Image (cartoon, rainbow, N blue to C red):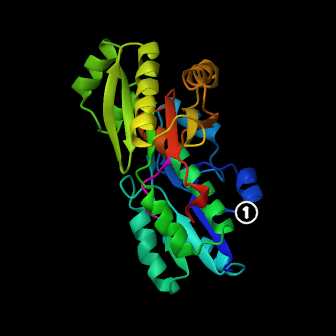
Amino acid sequence: MSKIAVITDSNAHFLPQEAKELGISIVPMPFTIDNETFYENITLTRDEFYQRMESGASIATSQPSPSDVMSAWDKALETHDEVVYIPMSSGLSGSCQSARMLAMEYDGKVEVVNNQRISVTLKRSVLDAIELAQRGMTAAQIREELERVRYESSIYIMLDTLHYLKKGGRITPAAAAIGSLLRIKPVLQIKGERLDAFSKARTISQGKNIMINAMKHDIETLYGGTDSETVWLYAVHGNVPEQFAEYSQEVRAAFPNFRVMDDVLSLSVSCHIGPGALAIACSKKIPIDRN
């Protein structure tokens, strides 16, 4: 049986200790903060990221360098037969396409998965890849399976402020000013390769209800779910632990037949939407008996 190495980037937000315990490798994502480059979980902690963001620093994401990606693959292939590399969604970054070009030099030993995931759902894909490898699937089979279910996940995010969407040019200054005046809480959706506007709320309570009801609809109509046997379900936040404690309980109350797990948004998402977000995410489970 082929020995498979699973590698992802830090958009999946595995803490270093988690990655070590799972036996996976992480390619760190670079962030440019006031023209200086930092690497997530190496020279940049989550706390430092949010402190810099709230102080008004200019922050931008970037792709991992080809040398960093290939170095991770080369090291893995010293002890494994094949590599499954799962980067962030190709719709949100060019890193997936770049990795696919690099993989052409590896004679089929590296399979790059383009399954349109980021943050919590990307993390779930990595865990699924580990399980599929344990079932005896090859790297190519794992890639095919993860890409087969690429659209079977949803994330809804309620923003705390419009400031960072305006700063990143995603909305006009006028729209941001009107939204701030009306205290609008935008609800965004990540499904597949796009980050799109989904709805607007006037209060935090209304925004929570919008996200929860949207997730109920997706689970019931798209994923055929009635309980934890069907989907992985997450309550998620972007650096608001006190507010999140209440929200997490509200999600659990809304989904009594599901196991709800707590997690955080990846920094690459927070970079564009700012701190203070609440979110809900799900990923359909891959049937154990499928393969």
Could you say where residue 34 lies in the image, as x and y percent from the top left?
47, 45
The three-letter amino acid code for the residue at tag 1 is Gly
Image quarter hosting the N terminus: bottom right
The secondary structure that most of the magenta stretch takes on is: loop
> Residue at position x 55%, y 81% from top?
109
Could you say where residue 127 lies in the image, as x and y percent from the top left?
63, 55
Vertical comparison of 106 with 270: above or below = below
> Residue at position x 52%, y 55% from top?
30
Residue 203 seen in the current view:
yes
Image quarter hosting the C terminus: bottom right
Could you say where residue 246 lies in the image, as x and y percent from the top left?
61, 18
Residue 159 seen in the current view:
no
Q: Which residue is mark 1?
A: 23
> Residue at position x 43%, y 26% from top?
211
Callout 1 environment at 10 Å: few (<14), some (14 to 19), or many (20+)? few
Residue numbers of the magenta segment: 113-119
> Of all residues shown, which one is farthest toward the bottom?
107
Could you say where residue 158 lies in the image, as x and y percent from the top left?
43, 27
Q: Dividing the picture into quarters, in which one does residue 252 lie?
A: top right
Give whichever of 23, 95 is nearer the camera: 23
